[in-house]
Image: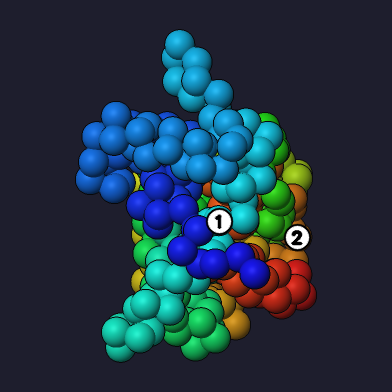
Amino acid sequence: MTMRHSLPPLSWILAFETAARHGSFLRAGEELGVSAGAVSQKIKALEGRLGRRLFERRPRGVRLSEEGQAYGEALTPLIDEIHAASQRCAGRSGGLHLAVSALPALAEKWLVPRLAGFGAAHPEIAVEVSAEARLVDFAEEAIDIAFRYATTPPRDPDSRALFSEDLLPVCSPAFLRQRPLRQPEDLLAAPKLYDTHWKDDWRIWLAAAGVDANAPLQGSAFTLYSMALEAAVAGQGVAMGHSKLVADDLAKGRLVAPFDLRVAAPGSHYLLLGPAAQRRPQVRAFLAWLESEMNETDAL
């Protein structure tokens, strides 16, 4: 029988697993609070104990060997479970941490309102959501999952499509009573509200409706889509709705759609995963929950 005292020291294993996740001894040292040299020494000792080369040393960094890749994939979920078990034993909630970066529009109008369901199903996972549109460098940032909107599929092999949307004008019931919109041409004289990043959505919908899409866009611009929608709810004009993002407001009667015409949005929402993210139990749990939410969203 193999004795447990023959296991490699945990400090060696942590040094290797952290370096494997980051693909860098330097980044691993920063996470562990030690020098890159100390990480290298621990990994070298671990390689000696196992009799396997876990990393290939190169002039400009390191790269996991085939054996190291397999070893890292096995270790990450185990270490996460050890951490979660220790947190539970200490009586602390949120034993696992999940970092999510999302486009502000998706975060505010779709993701955050649904997170209570995930929290109820997984109280041991603490979720941190950052609302931002910038590119994410998974190798340099502690982010597990990123939601982004793009007109072409991301090249990242770990990306996957979430959903596409339709465009449709929306306004408040009070606005529609005061300024009836009987045909698409009536929109030309109405104040239009739009996100500066999605300004072309109005041109796309008007062109599909047979309205002169080259006419100047009169209205108010916002740097956040949610602000454009709130302005519409307040009766300040008509916003171009993205079907999934305005679904809740339409269902609650905060907004109404004066026309039946829906036009495919030029982009889609995508999910991007950090390296080795799917090996982490909290990520797998989130993806499983997300799949169930997507099934409900598809019906909208």
- The vertical placement of 216 against 78, above or below, is above
Residue at coordinates 60% horizontally, 35% vertically from top-left?
Answer: 52
- The vertical placement of 31 against 249, above or below, is above
| Residue 261 visible (yes or no) | yes
Q: Quadrant of residue 54?
A: top right
- Image quadrant holding the N terminus, namely bottom right
Q: Which mark is residue 75?
A: 1
- Mark 2 packing: few (<14 Cα in 10 Å), some, or many (20+)? some
Q: Nearer the viewer, residue 164 or 207?
A: 164
Residue at coordinates 37% horizontally, 39% vertically from top-left?
Answer: 42
Q: Nearer the viewer, residue 99 or 191?
A: 99
Q: Would you say 1 lies left or right of 234 here?
A: right
Q: Nearer the viewer, mark 2 or mark 1?
A: 1
Q: Quadrant of residue 133?
A: top left
Q: Position of residue 293 (x, y in %)?
A: 66, 74
Residue at coordinates 62% horizontally, 31% vertically from top-left?
Answer: 65
Tag 2 residue: 261
Disc 2 residue type (three-letter):
Leu
Q: Nearer the viewer, residue 121 or 47?
A: 47
Q: Secondary structure at mark 2?
A: loop
